[in-house]
Image (spheres, helix red, strand yellow):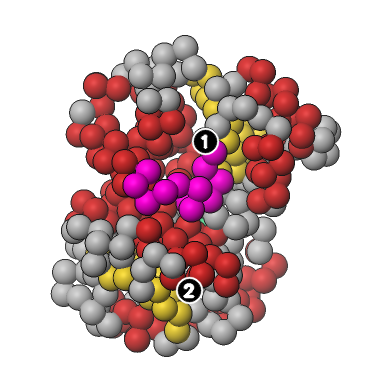
Amino acid sequence: MDLLRIADLEPKQLNEILSQAAAVKAAPEDTSDRLAGKHVGLFFMKPSTRTRVSTETATVDLGARPVVLGQQEVGLGKREAVEDVARVLDRYLDVLAMRVFDHADLVAVADNAEAPVINLLSDEEHPCQALADLQTIAEARPLAGTTLAYLGDGNNVCHSLMVGAAMSDMIVRIAAPPGYEPKREYLEVAQAHSDVTVTDNPVEAVQGAHVVYTDVWASMGQEEEAEARARRFYPFQVNGPLFAMADPGAIFLHCLPAHRGEEVTDDVMDHARSRVYDQAENRMHSFKGLLVYLFE
Ligand code: CP
Ligand code: NVA
Protein backbone atom coordinates (compact mmCIF):
# COMPACT_ATOMS: atom_id res chain seq x y z
CA MET A 1 0.00 0.00 0.00
CA ASP A 2 1.21 3.49 -0.84
CA LEU A 3 0.22 6.76 0.83
CA LEU A 4 0.63 9.43 -1.83
CA ARG A 5 -2.74 11.08 -1.22
CA ILE A 6 -4.80 10.92 1.97
CA ALA A 7 -7.65 9.49 -0.13
CA ASP A 8 -5.46 6.46 -0.88
CA LEU A 9 -6.86 5.35 2.49
CA GLU A 10 -10.42 4.25 3.09
CA PRO A 11 -12.02 6.21 5.96
CA LYS A 12 -11.85 3.03 8.04
CA GLN A 13 -8.10 2.69 7.39
CA LEU A 14 -7.54 6.34 8.28
CA ASN A 15 -9.38 5.76 11.54
CA GLU A 16 -7.31 2.66 12.28
CA ILE A 17 -4.03 4.53 11.69
CA LEU A 18 -5.21 7.31 14.02
CA SER A 19 -6.12 4.74 16.69
CA GLN A 20 -2.70 3.12 16.23
CA ALA A 21 -1.04 6.55 16.55
CA ALA A 22 -2.86 7.22 19.81
CA ALA A 23 -1.93 3.77 21.13
CA VAL A 24 1.74 4.21 20.19
CA LYS A 25 1.80 7.62 21.85
CA ALA A 26 0.28 6.20 25.06
CA ALA A 27 2.60 3.17 25.23
CA PRO A 28 5.67 3.58 22.96
CA GLU A 29 7.43 0.62 24.60
CA ASP A 30 4.82 -1.78 23.16
CA THR A 31 6.08 -1.18 19.60
CA SER A 32 9.82 -0.74 20.27
CA ASP A 33 10.81 -3.69 18.04
CA ARG A 34 7.80 -3.83 15.73
CA LEU A 35 9.86 -2.97 12.62
CA ALA A 36 13.09 -4.75 13.65
CA GLY A 37 15.28 -5.56 10.65
CA LYS A 38 13.52 -3.13 8.31
CA HIS A 39 15.16 -0.23 6.47
CA VAL A 40 13.16 2.95 5.98
CA GLY A 41 14.31 5.34 3.24
CA LEU A 42 13.69 9.02 3.98
CA PHE A 43 14.39 11.18 0.94
CA PHE A 44 14.21 14.99 0.94
CA MET A 45 14.25 17.23 -2.10
CA LYS A 46 13.26 20.29 -0.02
CA PRO A 47 14.17 21.60 3.42
CA SER A 48 12.51 20.02 6.46
CA THR A 49 12.71 20.13 10.23
CA ARG A 50 9.63 18.34 11.60
CA THR A 51 9.31 15.71 8.89
CA ARG A 52 13.04 14.99 8.79
CA VAL A 53 13.37 14.52 12.54
CA SER A 54 9.99 12.97 13.37
CA THR A 55 10.27 10.29 10.70
CA GLU A 56 13.84 9.38 11.67
CA THR A 57 13.07 9.19 15.40
CA ALA A 58 9.86 7.24 14.73
CA THR A 59 11.78 4.74 12.57
CA VAL A 60 14.44 4.19 15.25
CA ASP A 61 11.82 3.92 18.01
CA LEU A 62 10.16 1.07 16.09
CA GLY A 63 13.45 -0.82 15.87
CA ALA A 64 14.03 -0.11 12.16
CA ARG A 65 16.96 1.64 10.53
CA PRO A 66 16.49 4.95 8.74
CA VAL A 67 18.44 5.73 5.58
CA VAL A 68 18.26 9.48 5.05
CA LEU A 69 18.95 10.80 1.55
CA GLY A 70 19.08 14.25 0.01
CA GLN A 71 18.62 15.39 -3.54
CA GLN A 72 22.26 16.49 -3.70
CA GLU A 73 23.39 12.87 -3.53
CA VAL A 74 20.54 11.13 -5.36
CA GLY A 75 19.87 13.63 -8.15
CA LEU A 76 16.33 12.29 -8.69
CA GLY A 77 15.47 12.85 -12.34
CA LYS A 78 18.83 14.54 -12.96
CA ARG A 79 21.67 12.17 -12.12
CA GLU A 80 19.35 9.23 -12.77
CA ALA A 81 15.82 8.67 -14.08
CA VAL A 82 13.17 8.66 -11.36
CA GLU A 83 12.08 5.15 -12.38
CA ASP A 84 15.62 3.76 -12.07
CA VAL A 85 16.16 5.35 -8.67
CA ALA A 86 12.90 3.73 -7.54
CA ARG A 87 13.87 0.28 -8.87
CA VAL A 88 17.28 0.45 -7.19
CA LEU A 89 16.14 1.80 -3.80
CA ASP A 90 13.42 -0.85 -3.80
CA ARG A 91 16.15 -3.54 -3.69
CA TYR A 92 17.53 -2.19 -0.39
CA LEU A 93 14.67 -0.54 1.44
CA ASP A 94 11.35 -1.68 2.96
CA VAL A 95 9.71 1.77 2.81
CA LEU A 96 10.36 4.70 0.46
CA ALA A 97 9.24 7.92 2.14
CA MET A 98 9.88 10.95 -0.01
CA ARG A 99 9.51 14.75 -0.06
CA VAL A 100 9.46 16.06 -3.64
CA PHE A 101 8.44 19.08 -5.66
CA ASP A 102 6.45 17.35 -8.37
CA HIS A 103 3.79 14.89 -7.22
CA ALA A 104 4.25 13.02 -10.52
CA ASP A 105 7.71 11.94 -9.28
CA LEU A 106 6.05 10.11 -6.37
CA VAL A 107 3.66 8.40 -8.73
CA ALA A 108 6.60 7.31 -10.90
CA VAL A 109 8.40 5.92 -7.84
CA ALA A 110 5.28 4.08 -6.66
CA ASP A 111 4.81 2.59 -10.13
CA ASN A 112 8.35 1.18 -10.04
CA ALA A 113 8.73 -0.03 -6.46
CA GLU A 114 7.20 -2.91 -4.52
CA ALA A 115 7.91 -1.24 -1.17
CA PRO A 116 5.26 1.13 0.22
CA VAL A 117 5.85 4.71 -0.95
CA ILE A 118 4.91 7.46 1.49
CA ASN A 119 4.49 11.12 0.51
CA LEU A 120 6.41 13.36 2.91
CA LEU A 121 5.06 16.45 1.04
CA SER A 122 4.62 17.20 -2.62
CA ASP A 123 3.15 20.17 -4.49
CA GLU A 124 -0.25 18.42 -4.23
CA GLU A 125 -0.50 16.85 -0.78
CA HIS A 126 1.01 16.42 2.68
CA PRO A 127 -0.84 13.34 3.96
CA CYS A 128 1.48 12.61 6.91
CA GLN A 129 0.80 16.15 8.14
CA ALA A 130 -2.94 15.47 7.95
CA LEU A 131 -2.49 12.35 10.11
CA ALA A 132 -0.84 14.45 12.84
CA ASP A 133 -3.45 17.20 12.42
CA LEU A 134 -6.32 14.76 12.90
CA GLN A 135 -4.56 13.08 15.83
CA THR A 136 -4.19 16.49 17.50
CA ILE A 137 -7.82 17.45 16.90
CA ALA A 138 -8.98 14.06 18.21
CA GLU A 139 -7.07 14.77 21.44
CA ALA A 140 -9.27 17.85 21.91
CA ARG A 141 -12.66 16.52 20.80
CA PRO A 142 -14.26 13.72 18.75
CA LEU A 143 -13.60 14.31 15.05
CA ALA A 144 -17.12 13.61 13.79
CA GLY A 145 -19.24 16.76 13.89
CA THR A 146 -16.29 19.05 14.70
CA THR A 147 -16.04 22.18 12.55
CA LEU A 148 -12.65 22.99 11.04
CA ALA A 149 -11.91 26.41 9.52
CA TYR A 150 -8.84 26.54 7.25
CA LEU A 151 -7.73 30.03 6.25
CA GLY A 152 -5.29 30.90 3.50
CA ASP A 153 -3.78 29.07 0.57
CA GLY A 154 -5.60 26.07 -0.93
CA ASN A 155 -2.25 24.25 -1.03
CA ASN A 156 -0.80 20.79 -0.35
CA VAL A 157 -1.51 20.97 3.39
CA CYS A 158 -5.05 22.22 2.72
CA HIS A 159 -5.77 19.40 0.24
CA SER A 160 -4.76 16.56 2.59
CA LEU A 161 -6.34 18.14 5.66
CA MET A 162 -9.61 18.99 3.92
CA VAL A 163 -10.03 15.49 2.48
CA GLY A 164 -8.85 13.73 5.66
CA ALA A 165 -11.15 15.83 7.84
CA ALA A 166 -14.10 15.17 5.54
CA MET A 167 -13.29 11.43 5.59
CA SER A 168 -13.50 11.73 9.40
CA ASP A 169 -16.98 13.29 9.17
CA MET A 170 -15.81 16.75 10.18
CA ILE A 171 -17.45 19.89 8.85
CA VAL A 172 -14.89 21.84 6.83
CA ARG A 173 -14.91 25.52 5.89
CA ILE A 174 -12.12 26.84 3.69
CA ALA A 175 -11.55 30.60 3.37
CA ALA A 176 -9.20 31.56 0.54
CA PRO A 177 -8.75 34.55 -1.76
CA PRO A 178 -10.29 34.00 -5.21
CA GLY A 179 -7.78 32.14 -7.37
CA TYR A 180 -6.14 30.41 -4.39
CA GLU A 181 -8.89 27.95 -3.48
CA PRO A 182 -8.12 24.22 -3.18
CA LYS A 183 -8.23 22.36 -6.49
CA ARG A 184 -11.67 21.27 -7.62
CA GLU A 185 -10.71 17.57 -7.74
CA TYR A 186 -9.82 17.59 -4.02
CA LEU A 187 -12.93 19.58 -3.15
CA GLU A 188 -15.10 17.05 -4.94
CA VAL A 189 -13.49 14.14 -3.10
CA ALA A 190 -13.99 15.94 0.23
CA GLN A 191 -17.58 16.91 -0.54
CA ALA A 192 -18.41 13.28 -1.32
CA HIS A 193 -17.65 12.52 2.36
CA SER A 194 -18.96 15.49 4.33
CA ASP A 195 -20.15 19.11 4.46
CA VAL A 196 -17.25 21.07 2.91
CA THR A 197 -17.58 24.68 1.76
CA VAL A 198 -15.27 27.31 0.31
CA THR A 199 -15.70 31.04 0.87
CA ASP A 200 -13.66 34.20 0.38
CA ASN A 201 -14.94 35.52 3.71
CA PRO A 202 -12.63 34.59 6.63
CA VAL A 203 -15.18 35.65 9.28
CA GLU A 204 -17.83 33.37 7.78
CA ALA A 205 -15.40 30.46 7.97
CA VAL A 206 -14.15 31.07 11.51
CA GLN A 207 -17.45 31.94 13.22
CA GLY A 208 -18.14 29.22 15.83
CA ALA A 209 -15.45 26.87 14.43
CA HIS A 210 -13.88 24.37 16.84
CA VAL A 211 -10.52 24.30 15.05
CA VAL A 212 -8.84 27.21 13.27
CA TYR A 213 -5.95 26.25 10.98
CA THR A 214 -3.62 28.15 8.70
CA ASP A 215 -0.41 27.59 6.72
CA VAL A 216 2.16 29.87 5.08
CA TRP A 217 0.95 32.02 2.20
CA ALA A 218 3.92 31.11 -0.02
CA SER A 219 5.02 27.47 0.09
CA MET A 220 8.51 26.15 -0.53
CA GLY A 221 9.34 26.89 -4.17
CA GLN A 222 6.99 29.93 -4.29
CA GLU A 223 9.39 32.34 -2.58
CA GLU A 224 9.36 34.73 -5.56
CA GLU A 225 5.59 35.14 -5.24
CA ALA A 226 5.76 35.91 -1.52
CA GLU A 227 5.28 39.67 -1.78
CA ALA A 228 2.36 39.53 -4.21
CA ARG A 229 0.73 36.76 -2.21
CA ALA A 230 1.11 38.67 1.08
CA ARG A 231 -1.06 41.48 -0.34
CA ARG A 232 -3.79 39.05 -1.42
CA PHE A 233 -3.74 36.96 1.76
CA TYR A 234 -3.49 39.68 4.41
CA PRO A 235 -7.30 39.69 5.12
CA PHE A 236 -6.99 35.96 5.91
CA GLN A 237 -4.44 36.47 8.70
CA VAL A 238 -5.37 34.55 11.86
CA ASN A 239 -5.07 37.24 14.54
CA GLY A 240 -6.55 37.70 18.03
CA PRO A 241 -9.83 39.37 16.96
CA LEU A 242 -10.48 36.75 14.27
CA PHE A 243 -9.62 33.81 16.55
CA ALA A 244 -12.01 35.29 19.17
CA MET A 245 -14.90 34.74 16.71
CA ALA A 246 -14.36 30.98 16.80
CA ASP A 247 -15.95 28.71 19.40
CA PRO A 248 -14.88 29.74 22.96
CA GLY A 249 -13.01 26.42 23.28
CA ALA A 250 -11.52 26.53 19.77
CA ILE A 251 -7.95 25.33 19.25
CA PHE A 252 -5.44 26.83 16.82
CA LEU A 253 -3.34 24.63 14.55
CA HIS A 254 -0.53 25.30 12.05
CA CYS A 255 1.61 22.67 10.33
CA LEU A 256 4.68 24.90 10.87
CA PRO A 257 7.02 26.46 9.99
CA ALA A 258 4.97 29.61 10.75
CA HIS A 259 5.73 33.07 9.50
CA ARG A 260 4.76 35.00 12.62
CA GLY A 261 3.19 38.35 11.75
CA GLU A 262 2.08 37.09 8.33
CA GLU A 263 -0.51 34.28 8.28
CA VAL A 264 -0.65 34.20 12.11
CA THR A 265 0.10 36.71 14.83
CA ASP A 266 2.13 36.00 17.97
CA ASP A 267 -0.91 36.20 20.27
CA VAL A 268 -2.58 33.31 18.41
CA MET A 269 0.59 31.21 18.00
CA ASP A 270 1.27 31.59 21.73
CA HIS A 271 -2.39 31.42 22.81
CA ALA A 272 -3.39 29.06 25.66
CA ARG A 273 -5.51 27.22 23.10
CA SER A 274 -2.77 26.95 20.46
CA ARG A 275 -1.82 23.29 19.98
CA VAL A 276 0.90 23.80 17.37
CA TYR A 277 3.70 22.11 19.33
CA ASP A 278 1.55 19.11 20.27
CA GLN A 279 0.71 18.93 16.58
CA ALA A 280 4.42 18.95 15.68
CA GLU A 281 5.07 16.21 18.28
CA ASN A 282 2.24 14.17 16.82
CA ARG A 283 4.07 14.05 13.49
CA MET A 284 6.28 11.45 15.19
CA HIS A 285 3.50 9.41 16.84
CA SER A 286 1.32 9.41 13.74
CA PHE A 287 4.23 8.33 11.51
CA LYS A 288 4.82 5.44 13.90
CA GLY A 289 1.11 4.65 13.73
CA LEU A 290 1.33 4.59 9.94
CA LEU A 291 4.42 2.33 9.84
CA VAL A 292 2.95 -0.08 12.38
CA TYR A 293 -0.27 -0.19 10.34
CA LEU A 294 1.65 -0.85 7.10
CA PHE A 295 3.53 -3.83 8.56
CA GLU A 296 0.72 -5.33 10.66
N1 CP B 1 5.20 20.59 8.89
C1 CP B 1 6.27 20.17 8.20
O1 CP B 1 6.20 19.33 7.30
O2 CP B 1 7.43 20.76 8.59
P1 CP B 1 8.86 20.59 7.89
O3 CP B 1 8.77 21.22 6.53
O4 CP B 1 9.84 21.29 8.80
O5 CP B 1 9.14 19.12 7.76
N1 NVA C 1 2.64 24.47 2.36
C1 NVA C 1 3.96 24.41 2.95
C2 NVA C 1 3.99 23.39 4.02
C3 NVA C 1 5.30 23.21 4.72
C4 NVA C 1 5.29 22.12 5.74
C5 NVA C 1 4.99 24.14 1.87
O1 NVA C 1 4.72 23.33 0.97
O2 NVA C 1 6.05 24.74 1.91
Closer to the camera in the image, 78 or 162: 162
Q: For residue 10: magenta?
A: yes
Residue type, label 1: Met
Residue 82 seen? yes
Q: Position of residue 57 (x, y in %)?
A: 41, 29
Q: Where is residue 216 in the image (x, y as percent from the top left)?
A: 50, 65
**Any mark on residue 1, and which?**
1
Q: Where is residue 24 in the image (x, y as percent from the top left)?
A: 27, 32
How packed is label 1: few (under 14 Cα within 10 Å), some, or many (20 or more)?
A: few
Taking the spot 20% from the left edge, 34% from the top edge, the residue there is: 26
User: What segment is highlighted magenta in the picture?
Assistant: 2-13
Vertical position of residue 10 compared to residue 175: above or below? above
Q: Position of residue 233 (x, y in %)?
A: 52, 79
Vertical position of residue 255 compared to residue 59: above or below? below
Determine whether the beta carbon of the residue marked 1 sits less than 8 angstroms from the nearest atom of ligand 1.
no
Badge 2 is on which residue? 152
Q: Is residue 160 left or right of residue 221?
A: left
